[in-house]
Amino acid sequence: MSIQLSIVIGYIVLLFAISVYAKKKASSGSTDFLFASRKLNTALVAVNIAGLAVGAASTIGVAENAFQVGIAAGWYNAAWAAGAAVMGLVAASKYRDLNCTTVPELFERYYDEKGRIISVIGLITIQVVITSLQYLAGGAILSSLLPEVFTFKSGMITSAVVFIGITLIGGLWSSGLSNIVSVALIYLGVLVGTAMTITQQGGLAAIAAKLPAGTDWFGPVGGLGLATIAGWFVVMITQTITAQGPVQIACGAESAVAARRGFLWGALLIFPIGFLCALMGLAAKVAYPSVQATMALPKIIMSLGPVIAGTTLAALWAADVSTACTLLLGAGTLFAQDIYKRFINPSVDDRTYLLINRLTILGLGVVTLWMAFNAVGILKTLLIGLSLTTAFTLVFLCTIFMPWLCRRNSAFYTTLAGMAALLAWQFIPAIRIFAHPIYLEWLVCVITFLTVAVIDKQKIAHGGEEPAVGAEIRVNDIHG
C-alpha cells in the first residue's frame, strides 16, 4: 500500500470514528442532529465557518483561477473572510437570539407563506450547486493523489460516499467535531505544501521570471480587474448573511456572544489560505503550463515527496469534507423544515422528522453527484450561484434594521425579481453590462423592494411605527 493511500484511508477512518462519537451527542432528537444541541462554543463556531468557507472553491478553485490570472485569485478567500466578519458583526448574534432554524422560516414569521416557499426553492438551489462542486474537486484530488486507484469519476463517487456518510451519521455535531481535525490538517498541509513548492522551484523570484509575459501575475489585481474583485466581496458578504450553511452554524452556537466571536475568529482562519493556494497555482503554471487548470493544484503537489504530497492533498480533500457536510446538512434542513414539516406533515413526530432529514440528505447527495459530472469551472459556477442570495440578504437586513420599510409582499417579489435577473443574465447576453451578476442582482432587488414598499400598504406583522435604525427585534415581537 502506498504512503498516499495510507494517509487517505487513515483520514477517512478518523472522520468516521469522529462521526460515530458525534452520533451519540446527536441521538436525542432533531435539534441535536441539525443544530448540535445549540451548544457550539466560540472555537467550534470558528472552525465550522472556516471549514465551510475553505472548500473546493477556496483551494482547487483559487489555484485554477491563479493559473490563469495570477495571485490576485487569493482575494476570493479574503472576500469570504470579509463575509464571515460582517456576519459576526451584523447578523450572527441576531440569528441566535431569534432561535430560528432557516431563513425561509424567518420570512414566513414576518411576511407570508409564499415568501417562505420561494425562498426555500432559491436556497436549496444554491446549496445543491455549491455541494456539487465539492465532489468535482474531490475527484480531482483523489485521482491526482492515487491515479492507480481512482479515476476522476470514481474519485468523485468516493468523495460523495464519504461526505454523505459522515453527514448522515452525526449531523452538525459530526461536521463540527470533524472540522477541528480538518481545519488543522488544511493549515498543516497548505502551509507545508506551499513552502515546499516554492523552495523546490527556486523561490518566488524564479517563479516570477518563468511566468509568461502579458499578465501582472503578482500584482494586487492581476488579470482580474478591480470590478471583479469587488464583486467577489459583494457576493461573499451577501451570501454569508443568509446562505443556510452560515445561518445553521450561527443558530447552533451556545449563545449570541459565541456566535459573534466565532464568526470573527473564523474570518481570521479563512483569510490566508487563498493566497497560499494561489502561489501553488502559479508554481503549477511554470512547471506544467499545458495542464488542465482544475488540475493545477493537485498536479504541483504531487511533485513533492510522497509524505508531503499525501498530507497536503489529504488536507485539500479535508477542505471538501468540511464544506460538503455542512452544505448537505443545510440542504436537508431546508427541505425537511420548510417543505415537509411546514406543508406535507405539520404534526410529524421528532423521530420521523429526523428520518426525513436523513433521507433528504441522502437524496440530495445523489442529485448533487449527478450535477458534479456536468459542472465546469468551480469558481465561476459558485459565484453565479451565490449571487442568488442577494434578495434574501436584502430582505433580512431590512427586516432587522428597517422594518418600517417592509411590506407583506416584500420577500416574495424581491426574491422572484432576483431569480428572474439571474436567469436573464444566463440567457440574455445583452443585459450583461456589469462586471459581475451580483451588481445586477443588487440593483434589481433594491428597486423591487422599494417599489413594493410604495405600492403595498400592508406592513409586516410586528408593527407599524418606525423604530430607531439598528433597533433589535425581540422574539416576542414575532407573530408566527
Image (cartoon, rainbow, N blue to C red):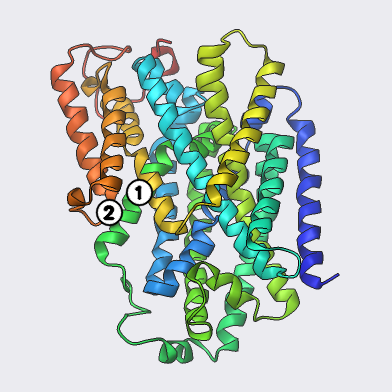
Q: If the image is split into quadrants, where does the N terminus sit?
A: bottom right
Name the amino acid type tagged 2.
His
Q: Nearer the viewer, residue 13 or 374?
A: 374
Q: Secondary structure at mark 1?
A: helix
Direction top: furthest residue? 347
Above or below, comparing residue 430 to residue 22 in the picture: below
User: Looking at the image, which residue is at 40% across and 45% down?
Assistant: 385
Determine the residue positioned at 62% across, 37% down: 40
Residue 50 visible in image: no
Q: Position of residue 252 (x, y in %)?
A: 58, 33
Q: CA distance from mark 2 to mark 1?
A: 9 Å
Give residue 316's position: percent from left, percent from top. Answer: 62, 62
- Residue 61 appears at what percent x and percent y? 48, 62
Numbered badge on residue 284: none
In the displayed orientation, state which residue is furthest to the left: 454
Residue for point 81% across, 59% down: 10
- The answer to whether marks 2 and 1 mark residues whose Cβ atoms lie closer than 8 Å is yes
| Rendered view: 248 above or below 216 | above
Q: Is residue 403 left or right of residue 362?
A: left
Foreground pick, 404 / 430: 430
With 106 as the anchor, is 172 left or right in this view? right
Left or right position of 338 against 438: right
**Residue annotated with mark 1:** 235
From the image, tell me which residue sits under label 2: 436
Q: Which one is nearer the viewer's eye here, 42 or 219?
A: 219
**Image quarter of residue 238:** top left
Query: Would you call the spot at circle 2 few (<14 residues within 10 Å), some (14-19), or many (20 or more)?
Result: many
Q: Residue at x 40, y 48 (%)?
A: 83
